Amino acid sequence: MTDASTGATADRIAALEHRLAEVEDRLALLQIVAAYGPAVDSGSAEVTAAMWTADGVYDTFPAALAGQAAIGDMVTGEMHQGLIGSGAAHLLGIPHIELNGDSAVVTNYSQLVLREPDSDGYRIWRTGVNRWEFTRTAEGWRVVRRINRQLDGTAEGRDLLAEAIDPADPGR
Amino acid sequence: MTDASTGATADRIAALEHRLAEVEDRLALLQIVAAYGPAVDSGSAEVTAAMWTADGVYDTFPAALAGQAAIGDMVTGEMHQGLIGSGAAHLLGIPHIELNGDSAVVTNYSQLVLREPDSDGYRIWRTGVNRWEFTRTAEGWRVVRRINRQLDGTAEGRDLLAEAIDPADPGR
Amino acid sequence: MTDASTGATADRIAALEHRLAEVEDRLALLQIVAAYGPAVDSGSAEVTAAMWTADGVYDTFPAALAGQAAIGDMVTGEMHQGLIGSGAAHLLGIPHIELNGDSAVVTNYSQLVLREPDSDGYRIWRTGVNRWEFTRTAEGWRVVRRINRQLDGTAEGRDLLAEAIDPADPGR
């Protein structure tokens, strides 16, 4: 084997390693977003909080929650416990992922669907957009900031959606 | 090329092969879950049944269906045919995937949405959680057992959601 | 290193490159489908149109839109602007992907969910199936034709769903 072909082999392997790591990052981000619903709808405050960094922020209605303790308190709080006790599902949509080394932005829709005993069915209480800002930590991807806004005709929700897309590259 | 560098090359290639196979498994599991709605909503009993192993179980309301014949009969049955004849969609949520060699557990939400002619729209009849237990066969991943429970305030649904997540590793 | 082992190494690397490219294609197709909602619900006509090839077709109710200009006009049109101005979400389901070299077919569900101010909630106006026919271009995957049909009990929607699945291979 020549030195040249040995070098070419090493380059091809390094390229594969780099590309595969990106693919694994995308699937890891999908996985953590897919765990959010199971975490909150089972009332698991600890797991929910641990998806964020220690000082991570969940900016949602009616207020921004700052830090893991505040996020965990949302799950154990009276309002959330009431919802899951009568039947609730936090449905998370397919993720649009923008990956940049050790940070990433995921944009997706979410809905909060509630049991309606009187109609033998469910109603949609909330439908909004989420911008999840992730950072890579020693333990894996964690949320630095998640912003949730309702798609209720106001501009904030539409602006978050617009941030996810790039006129110069619709497949970005 | 030294023996040492040859060995290192082989190790890197083997590591890539192992990691890529896991990625392909995750995408194959996503694909089969994404085929479930098209299978049942098109009334394709044979394809639906073939997603399970020969003696696979679909444990759902009002009873557990055991074996491919029972699962196919659900699709050709009067109730299901009535639903798809008037407009029905089985919507499957993003999958949380736990992969363990030749077995895997997928947890996701599902909804059954029905056409309501009077309102020019659709209503949500059911919203629940699914735990899909897969095994790898010679023909690919197949369902050994799928459990579906409504998120209606009872504990069973919340318990299935809790099984998917790990307090020690929220990104698992 | 022998010539034989060098050849075997090259073959294994080539196989990895081929398989990884397929995985990347699947994730790229997921990404573009995940960008559709953010594009239309933010009113971004240019990005929406650029997801299609120049003469791509969006065959939907009440008419087929042919070419990027027609697709962009849908987004800037009075009806669509009215919807997003009062609160609308185009929710896209998990994609079933059939990849064939430089072309691909994605089948998934979609819903159009609208804000209902009177009920402090949202209603589902439309629920249908999409068949997206993609081609690989120098700029990435683009839509050649997308067909959207409502799941309202008519055969067209069920037929599109049936096209996605293969009785001989439920995991295809």
Image (cartoon, coloured by chain):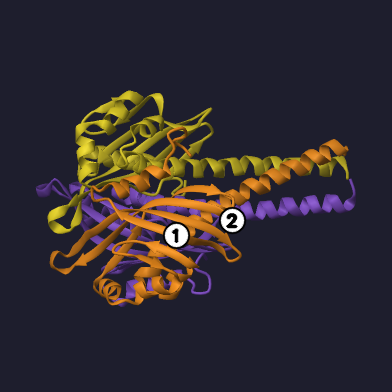
Chain colours: A orange, B purple, C yellow
Residue C34 position, x and y percent, is 40, 45
Residue bearing mark 2? B22
Residue bearing mark 1? A145
Q: Residues within 10 Å of mark 2 (few under 14, many from 20)?
A: some
**Front-lying residue, C59 or B148:** C59
Chain at tag 2: B
Residue at 67% of width from left, 51% of height from top? B17
Chain at tag 1: A
Q: Is residue A17 above or below residue A56?
A: above
- Residue B56 in view, yes or no: no
Number of numbered discs overlaid on the protein picture: 2
- Residue A17 in view, yes or no: yes
Residue A113 position, x and y percent, is 26, 61
What kind of residue is marked 1?
Arg
Q: CA distance from mark 1 to mark 2?
A: 29 Å
| Marks 1 & 2 on one chain | no
- Secondary structure of the residue carrying tag 1 is strand
